[in-house]
């Protein structure tokens, strides 16, 4: 028919190849999502008899074979919150220096290499460092402060790396336009670079909550305790210089150290920990999407 292109064998082969590629990519996406759905579904089914607000707000009872997880939940909030208060400002400021101010010389290349390597150090190594540096050398003892500082050291390299990537995503033309009108480097960073990279920076920082909340070895070596008596629903249950319970260690304890525990309790603890992590990740994704929507480029 006039005005229409003929569907040649070459075009047909391209369409078939495109369909196959699309199907393979869709299959790989499903292969990534399906295990997560299976894990979450399996945990929820086994944890369902124990899941309730009472389980979250109550304290462990009868030798930890009954009751809830409130002391461990609050302890995790303390550990994650304090570690982020320490690591986020240091990581962001260090990334700004490395990306915006540091010259390309052997020393700064060595610093970049150290940051990359530290991001891959196993958590047990960070735990031993925290034990020696904060518990013994700094004489903080086994405490929330020691555990939080250890988690901060552990998450710091990833925050630096993610912040540098966010800063590098801002076009150089933006910086050059500011410099051409007489702005200083700091004015450029403060008024142009940071506002246009804040979505990536905040996402990188928030996602470290997942890692900090799920780590067991660092808190076990430096500040977590098997059991700590607190009042039901009490939010300010700990001080910085005392030990605390943590969800990750509490889960390990219930699963391996407590005899005759209800089968649903360890799974319910795992669901709360996993749900908290997924909720934080979802908040990070939503925040990133909202901030990206406000960009003008």
Image (spheres, rainbow, N blue to C red):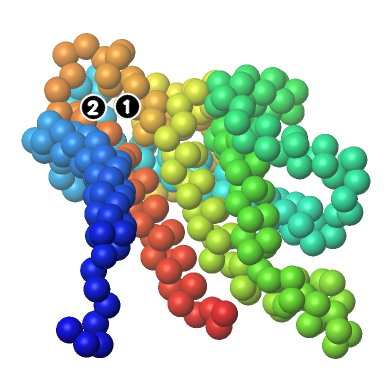
Question: Which structural element holds mark 1?
Answer: helix
Quadrant showing the N terminus: bottom left
Q: Residues within 10 Å of mark 2 (few under 14, many from 20)?
A: many
| 36 is higher (above) or lower (below) than 122 | below
In this view of the protein, can residue 54 be seen by the observer? Answer: no
Work out whether residue 149 or residue 5 is closer to the camera in this orientation and state it: 5
Q: Position of residue 279 (x, y in %)?
A: 33, 53
Relative to 149, does residue 14 appear above or below in the rendering?
below
Q: CA distance from mark 2 to mark 1?
A: 6 Å
Where residue 188 sits, quadrant-wise, is bottom right
Task: Assign a secondary structure to mark 2.
Answer: helix
Q: Quadrant of the C terminus?
A: bottom right
Relative horizontal placement of residue 173, taking residue 241 as reference (left or right): right
Of label 2 and label 1, which has the lower sequence position? 1
| Residue 218 position (above or below residue 58) | above
Q: Are marks 2 and 1 in contact (CB under 8 Å)?
A: yes
Q: At which x and y percent is residue 221?
A: 54, 21
Residue found at x 46% / y 77%: 293
Q: Position of residue 285 (x, y in %)?
A: 41, 60
Q: Indicate which disc residue 266 carries.
A: 2
Q: Residue at x 85, y 80 (%)?
A: 179
* In the image: residue 206, left or right of residue 100: left
Q: Please tell me which residue is depicted at 71% across the width and 25% down the height of the picture.
A: 133
Residue placed under numbered mark 1 in the picture: 251
């Amino acid at each position: 028919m006039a005005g229409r292109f003929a569907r040649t064998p070459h075009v047909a082969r391209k369409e078939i190849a495109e369909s196959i590629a699309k199907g393979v990519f869709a299959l790989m996406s499903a292969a990534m999502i399906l295990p997560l759905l299976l894990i979450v579904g399996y945990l929820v089914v086994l944890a369902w008899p124990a899941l309730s607000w009472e389980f979250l707000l109550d304290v462990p009872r009868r030798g930890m074979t009954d009751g809830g997880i409130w002391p461990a939940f609050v302890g995790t909030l303390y550990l994650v919150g304090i570690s982020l208060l320490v690591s986020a400002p240091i990581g962001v400021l260090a990334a700004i220096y490395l990306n915006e101010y540091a010259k390309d010389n052997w020393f700064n290349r060595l610093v970049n290499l150290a940051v990359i390597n530290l991001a891959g150090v196993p958590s047990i190594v960070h735990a031993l460092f925290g034990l020696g540096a904060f518990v013994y050398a700094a004489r903080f003892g086994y405490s929330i402060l020691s555990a939080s500082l250890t988690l901060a050291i552990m998450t710091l390299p990833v925050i630096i790396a993610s912040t540098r990537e966010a800063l590098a995503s801002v076009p150089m033309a933006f910086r050059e336009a500011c410099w051409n009108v007489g702005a200083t480097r700091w004015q450029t960073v403060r008024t142009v670079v940071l506002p246009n990279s804040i979505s990536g920076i905040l996402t990188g920082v928030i996602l470290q909550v997942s890692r900090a909340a799920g780590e067991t070895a660092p808190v076990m070596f430096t500040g977590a305790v098997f059991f700590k008596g607190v009042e039901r629903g009490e939010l300010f249950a700990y001080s910085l210089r005392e030990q605390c319970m943590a969800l990750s260690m509490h889960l390990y304890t219930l699963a391996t150290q407590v005899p005759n525990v209800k089968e649903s309790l360890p799974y319910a603890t795992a669901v709360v920990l996993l749900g908290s992590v997924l909720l934080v990740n979802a908040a990070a994704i939503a925040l990133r999407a909202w901030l990206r929507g406000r960009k003008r480029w």
